[in-house]
Image (spheres, grey):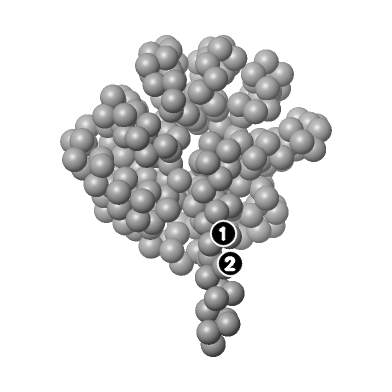
């Protein structure tokens, strides 16, 4: 099963760029199908009210027949009660598998880390090149898995990306996704030094083409086992295989419903 661990969905309210305006999935899903990508992790577009964004994503996930897996988008400035309410509603109630956070809103907080530890979900945190702080939260919250998208920087900051590889090597709870990484040699270096167990395939859809992003992973020329880890196995492990369990549960429900009919 090939899984894209990084895709936005729904409407934002910023109107300053695609990332906070609208993320429609029609074309993206057709491209995934053409590329052989089976599932996608989705979360809201950047916006001022992630409670509204999470509700919209939950609706998309519920209609996707297992094609989409939700992550709860949180703002680190949210009060603890709001954070818990969103996680209860979407992780416990809807089966969402993780937390998404962006430093554009606010730096990662203890409130988010403690909630991630309590609900046993990973945190996909865009550090926007602020690599040094990884040392702090990775050590403070060793029980939490942190996925750093774009190998640390969507802005093609090769110094930040190179620095992240050091954290991937040293911290067992720090991972990276490959979305939008333009310097191929850094992907090669990350896999060589940190190992395929620490890298996750992501596309930053719907704005980047998932087939093109997947082609970069194929171009690494990895053994089948390593390719499978990067393109789905690592994510399933980090979310405690919630993805597979949800599929099995839906399949069992469908069988039961068919028997009743």
Query: Residue at left 50%, top 64%?
Result: 64
Q: Is residue 222 left or right of residue 235?
A: right
Q: Residue 238, percent across and down?
A: 53, 36
| Secondary element at tag 2 | helix
Q: Are marks 1 and 2 in contact (CB under 8 Å)?
A: yes
Considering only vertical position in the picture, is 222 above or below 41?
above
Q: Quadrant of residue 170?
A: top right
Considering only vertical position in the picture, is 161 above or below 114?
above
Q: Quadrant of residue 141?
A: top left
Q: Residue 82, percent across and down?
A: 21, 42
Considering only vertical position in the picture, is 1 above or below 173?
below
Numbered marks: total: 2
Query: Residue at left 66%, top 48%?
Result: 2
Query: Residue at left 54%, top 87%?
Result: 261
Q: Is residue 188 left or right of residue 115?
A: right
Query: Residue at left 64%, top 40%?
Result: 233
Q: Residues within 10 Å of mark 1 (few under 14, many from 20)?
A: some
Question: Which residue ends up furthest to the bottom in the rendered image?
Answer: 261
Q: Residue 59, percent across and down?
A: 38, 62
Query: Could you say which is closer to the camera, residue 29 or residue 223?
Result: 223
Q: Residues within 10 Å of mark 2 (few under 14, many from 20)?
A: some
Calculate the distance from the C-alpha at mark 1 to the C-alpha at mark 2.
6 Å
Task: Please name the residue that numbered disc 1 is placed on.
Answer: 247
Q: Which mark is residue 251?
A: 2
| Secondary element at tag 1 | helix
């Amino acid at each position: 099963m090939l899984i894209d661990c990084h895709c936005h969905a729904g409407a934002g309210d910023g109107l300053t760029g695609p990332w906070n305006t609208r993320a429609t999935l029609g074309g993206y899903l057709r491209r995934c199908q053409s590329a052989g990508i089976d599932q996608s992790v989705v979360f809201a577009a950047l916006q001022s009210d992630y409670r509204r964004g999470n509700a919209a994503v939950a609706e998309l996930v519920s209609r996707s027949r297992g094609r989409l897996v939700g992550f709860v988008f949180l703002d680190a400035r949210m009060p603890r009660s709001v954070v818990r309410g969103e996680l209860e509603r979407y992780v416990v109630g809807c089966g969402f598998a993780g937390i998404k956070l962006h430093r554009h809103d606010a730096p990662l907080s203890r409130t988010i880390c403690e909630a991630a530890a309590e609900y046993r979900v990973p945190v996909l945190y865009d550090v926007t090149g602020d690599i040094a702080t990884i040392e702090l939260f990775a050590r403070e919250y060793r029980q939490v898995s942190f996925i750093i998208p774009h190998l640390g920087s969507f802005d093609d900051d090769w110094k930040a990306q190179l620095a992240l590889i050091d954290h991937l090597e040293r911290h067992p709870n720090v991972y990276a996704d490959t979305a939008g990484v333009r310097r191929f040699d850094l992907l090669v270096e990350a896999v060589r030094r940190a190992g395929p167990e620490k890298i996750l395939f992501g596309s930053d859809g719907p704005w980047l083409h998932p087939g093109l992003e997947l082609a970069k992973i194929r171009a690494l020329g990895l053994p089948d086992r390593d390719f499978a880890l990067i393109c789905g196995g690592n994510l399933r492990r980090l979310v405690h295989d919630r993805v597979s369990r949800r599929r099995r549960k839906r399949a069992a429900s469908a069988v039961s419903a068919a028997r009743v009919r």
